[in-house]
Image: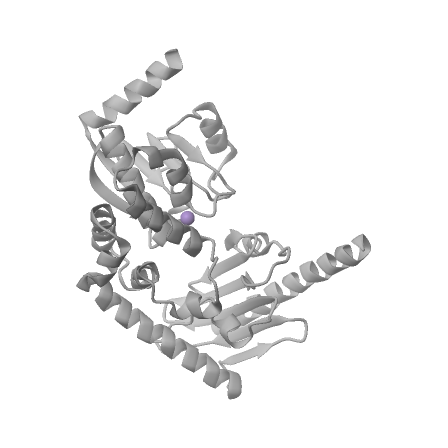
Amino acid sequence: VFRAFTWLLRGIFPAARPATLYLHYPCFDGVVSGALAWQFLETHRHWKIEHICPVNYDLRDTWLSTSLQIPCAVVDFLYHPQASFWADHHSTTFLTEQARRDYEQRWGPDRLYDEHSGSCAALLWRHTAAYLGSAERYKEMVEWAEKIDSASYISVEEAILGNAPALRINLSLSRGRTQEYCEFLVRQLRRGTLQRLAELSEVAGRYEVARKSIEAGLQFMDAKKRHPDENNEVRLEPDGVASFRLQPPAEVTISRYAPYYFFPDAAYSIGLVGSKKGFQITAMRNPWREFQSIPLGDIFAEYGGGGHERVGSVFLPDADSEKAEKMLSELLREMRIGMRSRSAAASAAV
Ligand SMILES: [Mn+2]
């Protein structure tokens, strides 16, 4: 009874003060989660959300020592003890054991966590659908958030060049990394369908620019596959790993799925992309093939990056190309050690 009473009070008190909504951004799942949480908290818990605060993993090191605006909700992002409402699905959400214990002690209907959920939006949906008005509209958003966040695309063409409204909005995020654009998207998602939002000029304009850049990336990669040079090469290794090193011009974007556009049967991809900001190394298990992946996120964590089982990534802002290429070959070697022990274990099992 006491517990129920506390929850009731928590439900009432945030209404007394303007609240802040923190959400993972730039991220389609983060934006949809933000819209769902806002709708739920406002209509069912009588919160008054006045500030939208996009957050990203570059805040990781200082997140737990940062005082949040109280009261607040945090969605699709790292656990924080000060959040009155929190929902996430990342297995790396608890930055410390203390944070995990805090969650376990304060477990309840305002702290939603499921590391097996493909998206935070789907997790929120399972808990709040009954309270959301215009549920069909939200249901469509949740289905797309799930598809995008868990990379369950039908084909590599859909992943890179798909033009469904949700995919157009998703691509526009790369050209709108500001608080203003984030807030605009969350507000609009509460008002209408994905279709309507994708057609607004704010989204359509950004999408057009991003789409051209992605198409240029495919052309650039194709050219370097056929004519490699000192800084650029793309190839399929004999063991089924698509590997690449690219330093494209500023207006050219290399899609993370691009290796599978050229090598659809590759088991894994790993590549290095250089830009003015630094070097990014990303590895992925082929999302269109079903097999147990080596733990890419763990491998990358050893090198200062992160991810999950099927995707690993590390950003090197200060590296020169020599240092970045050395890390690329070390990561590739680590992946091969993992692949060999996997196949040894598989043949032993047979
Ligand atoms: Mn997510």
Residue 313: x and y in percent read: 50, 59
Q: Looking at the image, what colour scheme do you see?
A: one colour
Residue 326: quarter of image: bottom right
Relative to residue 64, is residue 170 depicted above or below? below
Q: In this view of the protein, can residue 287 be seen by the observer?
A: yes
Q: Is residue 305 left or right of residue 342?
A: left
* Residue 284: quadrant of the picture: bottom right
Q: Residue furthest top?
A: 1
User: The N terminus appears in which quarter of the rendering?
Assistant: top left
Judging depth in this view, the residue of 106 and 167 nearest the camera is: 167
Left or right of 346? Residue 146 is left
Give the residue displayed 34% in from the left and 20% down from the top: 7
The location of residue 208, given as percent across then percent down, is 27, 71
Residue in front for this viewpoint, 262 or 233 = 262
The quadrant the C terminus occupies is bottom right
Q: Nearer the viewer, residue 209 or 42?
A: 42
Viewed as shown, does residue 342 lie left or right of 116?
A: right
Q: How many marks?
A: 0
Question: Residue 103 at what x, y percent from top left?
Answer: 45, 29
172 vs 116: above or below = below
Residue drawn at 68 percent across, 61 percent down? 339
